[in-house]
Image (cartoon, helix red, strand yellow):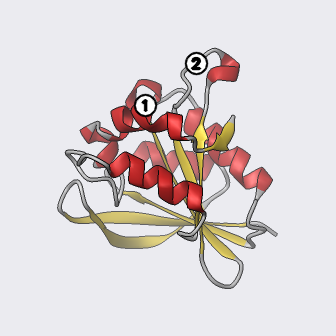
């Protein structure tokens, strides 16, 4: 189930986002996680001012953990949005990411005509999630990773919604 972020998610978000493997799979999560980072993330998500809509992957309906990961959509221009997600390592290779991406595609809350996504090239599993959800490879690029303190090669994907 995808649901809005709640302040009560802070502890589990900090636990999972504080894992080096999670942080190094993203552009923006620092490692180690500085104090207040999770609370600032939650405040930004709840404010709705950042141009990014954020949901929690919640497994309680299936008897699993309350916070499995995070998925977001960032509005771009010309009817486009960028999808981003991470899953806590305890739930890797369980289909959680694929289910969350499919759910977001079906809902298409931005009414986007095109969705973009990028993954670091050392994360082939995340690339497979995207291709399994109908994304097509667009090309190679680079992105800065805060946790790695370096530029990392990426694969960029797109999915046409019409």
Closer-to-camera residue (35/4): 35
Q: With 156 as the anchor, is 100 left or right in this view? A: right
Crowding at mark 1 (Cα within 10 Å: few <14, some 14-19, many 20+) = some
In the depicted structure, whether residue 161 falls above or below residue 1: below
Closer-to-camera residue (56/132): 56
Quarter-of-image position of residue 82: bottom right
Q: Is residue 102 visible to us here?
A: yes
Residue 114 appears at what percent x and percent y? Answer: 69, 71
Q: What element carries label 2?
A: loop
Q: Which residue is drawn at 57% across and 69% down?
A: 49
Q: For mark 2, what is the residue?
A: 64
Q: For mark 1, what is the residue?
A: 12
Which quadrant is home to the N terminus? top right
Residue 111 appears at what percent x and percent y? Answer: 78, 68
Residue 121 appears at what percent x and percent y? Answer: 34, 56
Quarter-of-image position of residue 2: top right
Specify the farthest residue to the top.
63
Q: Which residue is drawn at 75% across and 60% down?
A: 109
Residue 55 appears at what percent x and percent y? Answer: 61, 47
Q: With 40 as the anchor, is 106 left or right in this view? A: right
Q: Nearer the viewer, mark 1 or mark 2?
A: 1
In the depicted structure, whether residue 71 falls above or below residue 113: above
Earlier sequence position, callout 1 versus callout 2: 1
Q: Residue 57 carries which label?
A: none
Q: What element carries label 1?
A: helix
Which quadrant is home to the C terminus? bottom right
């Amino acid at each position: 189930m995808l649901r809005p972020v709640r302040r009560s998610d802070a502890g589990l978000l900090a636990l999972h986002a504080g894992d080096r493997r999670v942080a190094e799979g993203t552009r923006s999560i620092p490692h180690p996680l500085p104090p207040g980072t999770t609370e600032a993330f939650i405040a930004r998500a709840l404010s709705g001012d950042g141009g990014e809509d954020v949901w929690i992957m919640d497994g309680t309906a299936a008897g699993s953990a309350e916070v499995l990961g995070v998925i977001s959509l960032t509005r771009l221009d010309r009817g486009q949005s960028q999808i981003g997600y991470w899953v806590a390592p305890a739930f890797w290779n369980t289909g959680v990411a694929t289910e969350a991406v499919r759910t977001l595609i079906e809902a298409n809350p931005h009414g986007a005509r095109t969705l973009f996504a990028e993954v670091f090239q050392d994360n082939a599993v995340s690339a497979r999630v995207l291709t399994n959800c109908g994304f097509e490879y667009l090309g190679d690029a680079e992105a800065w990773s805060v946790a790695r303190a370096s530029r990392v090669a990426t694969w960029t994907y797109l999915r046409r919604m019409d």
